[in-house]
Every structure is written in structure tokens, then in C-alpha cells.
């Protein structure tokens, strides 16, 4: 009876969140994993008596659990997970590194890559003779050179031929490669046509992998847009921004809100360019209306980068450093024993931050703890620095700094803040670990 209940539960859970991740290993074994959101993960761990198995922990993942039905669950730093059918398939993932795609305007899906040495990648090219993607090439081959190949498995082989960085990596697709290489991203997703996305939208494309909340479109594309998306007018004069729009419903089930052309704006009584927003349900439209009303009633506010830290800790921030560091593993979903105060620990925090970089509420809560942790790593590793509080008199805000023996600050507090939120930028760069920015300032 219990087995039947568990089967029903599993099916119900997977119906809620049952995306698949198809993985092809280096030896061309194929493994299908099930992607789980946080809620589905917790239900499975409860119902199938999930037991953490640290011996099977994969590098760059939060935890590995063995379930009572023989399946293996791998948890990530953003609290999502994947489910593997059995331990045998799990062991085949030895060379697989799971990643979260980070192309800023695309959805942040879970993917993977296989990191190799250059010689192994070169052998694949010589033995398998894959098709080279000649449209993808370096802008500065004398400094950073690479070659990209399409493999028979459908995967992408990236050969980094840079003099001091020779390596090879296999990716499942160009999107995952683009997350690692901005030059590739520009060549794959960029276009010299300023109206490229407008034309895509007008052709009936909903751009499902784009994470943008709204697009711009010229009025000349409206006729094709309405025709190709099979739109009918559902409601008029809806506000989700300062200009009102008309809501259309597609025969395919989604909704498109388009600015009304004839309304007052900075250029007169007719809109020269329109905002277009795609919603999957009426509830999403209602939510957007409510959010706009809240913002309009509240008004636009701004505050100092370190205002929240100053308000909460004031001059006493150094007294809270240990407490803030203790909170970091929970916030980043890292086991406490994994967090070390050295370059390996910083790399781990960088990886966890990358998985959580679009969770802005979490980043706000993380920022004080990350400053505390990085500062302590600096003190332990460099044997230099002590915590001091700098008062920005203009804003009356207290800012934590690490003062070095030579009298300089270990890092620039503005750069640290901007790099942290811009992400994914390594903490060692944000925190000027090797003093590069300080040296550049001295040269100036």
C-alpha cells in the first residue's frame, strides 16, 4: 500500500516539475536526469528517506543524497536539485561539472560541462574530425585564441588555444558555452540589425528562452505581430508602467500587452516606439498591475550602497564579523565544514554566488556576510589588515574596511559593491586580492 502511495506521490511531484536534463558523458553514455525545484526536492527527501552521503559529494555541488528507492539526488547551491535513476548512473557522472547558465538576458537553466586538458580535446578533433564552427572565432587571436567544433553527439567542443591557458571543454550547447565566454555570447546572440528582436516577435516567436520582462517594437510591426501570434483584443487601457497598453490573447494560450500608440508622451500624442510584454496567464498580468501600483504609490527611492549595513551595525560591524561568517553557509546552502578561509574557500563561495546571482533579496542579505568572510580570508592568508570603520560624511554612512599596514585599504568599497552585484565576478577581483587596482591607482 505504501509503495502505491509513493508511486502516486512521485508522479504528482514530477507533473509539477518534471523537466529533464539529457547528459552525454565523455564515453558517450547517455543519462537522463530529472530537474527538481526546491519544493519537489524536499518532498522527495522526506517521502523516500533521503540520507546525505558525503562520500558521494560531487565537487561544485551542495550535497548528495541516497533515496530509499535507489535513486540519487544531487542538490545545488540555489536549492534546486537533479534526480539520477541509480548509483551506477551517478558514478558515470564523474567527469561532469554541473553549472547554471549565466547569459544575462536568457533564462538561468541548469546545464553541465566536461572539462578536459588541451591534449584530450585535440585528440577528439584528430580522431573524430568534427565540424568546425568557423563563424565563432576570437577577436584577438594573438592573445586569446580558440576553436569551436560541433560534435556528432550534438555537443560543442571548445578548444582554448591561448598561449598560457590551453584547455578543452565539452558543452551540451552554445548557450552553456556562451555563459563561459562573452565573445562567443556576442557572436551567437548578437546582431547588427537593431530591429532583430522586433522582427522575431513579429514573426510569431515568443522568445521563450529570453528572461527580459518587456521588449520594444515599432508600430510598423503590429499588423504582423497580431496576425502571426493569432491575437484578439481582450482588454484595453491596462497600466503596468507609466504608459497604458492593450491586452491581447493568443490562440496559443498566452497574453501580449502592447502600448497604445495614441497617447500623450514626451514626443507628443503618438508613441514612436512601443513596449511589448508577454504573459503566460491573466494572473501574471494582474500581478504586474499590482506591482506597478505599489511602485507608483511608494515612489522612487535611492540609498547609499552601504546604508543597510550602516543602519544595522553602525560602527560596531567588526564586532559582528564572526557572527556574520557563521551565517554564510546557511545563506549560500554550503555545509559549514566545506567553508575554509583560503583561496579554495573563496572559490567555493564564488561558485555558490554564481548559482544565486539572480536572487537579489538573498544577495542583499549575503552582502555583509561576504564582506566579513572575505576580509577574514585576507587577514588569515595575507597576515595583514585589520577592520576599521570609514564614515562617509556626506551620506552619514559607516562603511567596513580592511586597513593594511601600509595605510591603504585592502579594497575599494565602491568596486567591491558593484562587482558583487554585477556578478558573476570572482571575489578575489572584487576584493583586489593581488593589489592590481591599488597599483593601477598609484600609476595614475
Image: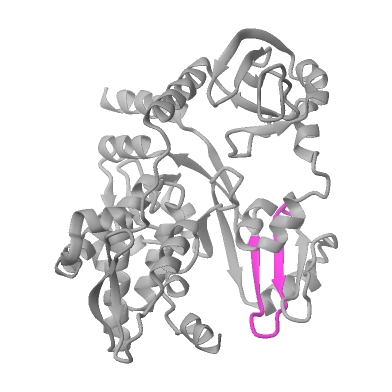
Of residues 271 and 248, the one nearer the viewer is: 271
Count of numbered tags: 0
On screen, residue 133 versus residue 407, left or right, reads right
Q: Where is residue 61, by image quadrant?
A: bottom left
Q: Residue at x 59, y 12 (%)?
A: 237
On screen, residue 246 versus residue 416, left or right, reads right
Q: Is residue 91 above or below residue 30?
A: below
Q: Is residue 383 above or below residue 60?
A: below
Residue 279 % position (x, y): 57, 23
- Residue 258 visible in the displayed image: yes
Quarter occupied by the N terminus = top left
Quarter occupied by the C terminus = bottom right
Q: Is residue 364 above or below residue 49?
A: below
Residue 168 falls within the magenta-colored stretch: yes
Q: Residue at x 57, y 34 (%)?
A: 213
- Residue 92 visible in the displayed image: no
Q: Is residue 212 above or below residue 220?
A: below
Residue 305 % position (x, y): 37, 57
- The residue most toward the bottom is 406
Q: Residue at x 77, y 69 (%)?
A: 138
Specify start and end residues of the magenta stretch as a single range: 153-170
Residue 371 % position (x, y): 31, 67
Residue 90 falls within the magenta-colored stretch: no
Q: Where is residue 170, by image quadrant?
A: bottom right
Q: Residue at x 55, y 89 (%)?
A: 443
> What color scheme is it?
one colour
Residue 67 % position (x, y): 32, 44
Amino acid at each position: 500500500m505504501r509503495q502505491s502511495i509513493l508511486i502516486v506521490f512521485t508522479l504528482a511531484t514530477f507533473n509539477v516539475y518534471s523537466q529533464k536534463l539529457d547528459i552525454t558523458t565523455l564515453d558517450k553514455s547517455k543519462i537522463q536526469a530529472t530537474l527538481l525545484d526546491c519544493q519537489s526536492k524536499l518532498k522527495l527527501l522526506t517521502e523516500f528517506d533521503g540520507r546525505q552521503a558525503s562520500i558521494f559529494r560531487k565537487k561544485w555541488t551542495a550535497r548528495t543524497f541516497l533515496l530509499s528507492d535507489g535513486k540519487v539526488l544531487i542538490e545545488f547551491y540555489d536549492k534546486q536539485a537533479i534526480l539520477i535513476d541509480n548509483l551506477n548512473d551517478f558514478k558515470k557522472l564523474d567527469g561532469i561539472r554541473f553549472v547554471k547558465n549565466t547569459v544575462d538576458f536568457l533564462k538561468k537553466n541548469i546545464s553541465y560541462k566536461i572539462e578536459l586538458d588541451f591534449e584530450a580535446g585535440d585528440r577528439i578533433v584528430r580522431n573524430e574530425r568534427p565540424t568546425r564552427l568557423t563563424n565563432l572565432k576570437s577577436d584577438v587571436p594573438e592573445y586569446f585564441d580558440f576553436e569551436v567544433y560541433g560534435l556528432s553527439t550534438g555537443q560543442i567542443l571548445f578548444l582554448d588555444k591561448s598561449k598560457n591557458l590551453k584547455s578543452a571543454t565539452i558543452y551540451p550547447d552554445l548557450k552553456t558555452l556562451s555563459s563561459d565566454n562573452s565573445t562567443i555570447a556576442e557572436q551567437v546572440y548578437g546582431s547588427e540589425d537593431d530591429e532583430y528582436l522586433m522582427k522575431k516577435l513579429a514573426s510569431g516567436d515568443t522568445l521563450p528562452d529570453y528572461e527580459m520582462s518587456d521588449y520594444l517594437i515599432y508600430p510598423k510591426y503590429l499588423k504582423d505581430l497580431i496576425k502571426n501570434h493569432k491575437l484578439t483584443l481582450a482588454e484595453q487601457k491596462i497600466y503596468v508602467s507609466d504608459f497604458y497598453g492593450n491586452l491581447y490573447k493568443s490562440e496559443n494560450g498566452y497574453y501580449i500587452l502592447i502600448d497604445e500608440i495614441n497617447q500623450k508622451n514626451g514626443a507628443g500624442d503618438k508613441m514612436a516606439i512601443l513596449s511589448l510584454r508577454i504573459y503566460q496567464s491573466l494572473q501574471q498580468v494582474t500581478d504586474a498591475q499590482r506591482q506597478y501600483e505599489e511602485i507608483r504609490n511608494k515612489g522612487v527611492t535611492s540609498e547609499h550602497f552601504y546604508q543597510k549595513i550602516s543602519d544595522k551595525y553602525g560602527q560596531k560591524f567588526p564586532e559582528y564579523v564572526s557572527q556574520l561568517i557563521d551565517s554564510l553557509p546557511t545563506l549560500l546552502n554550503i555545509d559549514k565544514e566545506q567553508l575554509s578561509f583560503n583561496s579554495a574557500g573563496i572559490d567555493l563561495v564564488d561558485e555558490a554566488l554564481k548559482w544565486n546571482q539572480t536572487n537579489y533579496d538573498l544577495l542583499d542579505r549575503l552582502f555583509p556576510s561576504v564582506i566579513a568572510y572575505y576580509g577574514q580570508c585576507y587577514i588569515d592568508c595575507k597576515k595583514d589588515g585589520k577592520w576599521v570603520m570609514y564614515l562617509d560624511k556626506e551620506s552619514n554612512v559607516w562603511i567596513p574596511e580592511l586597513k593594511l599596514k601600509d595605510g591603504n585599504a585592502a579594497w575599494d568599497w565602491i568596486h567591491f559593491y558593484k562587482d558583487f552585484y554585477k556578478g558573476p565576478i570572482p571575489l578575489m577581483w572584487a576584493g583586489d586580492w593581488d593589489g592590481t587596482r591599488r597599483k593601477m591607482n598609484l600609476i595614475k
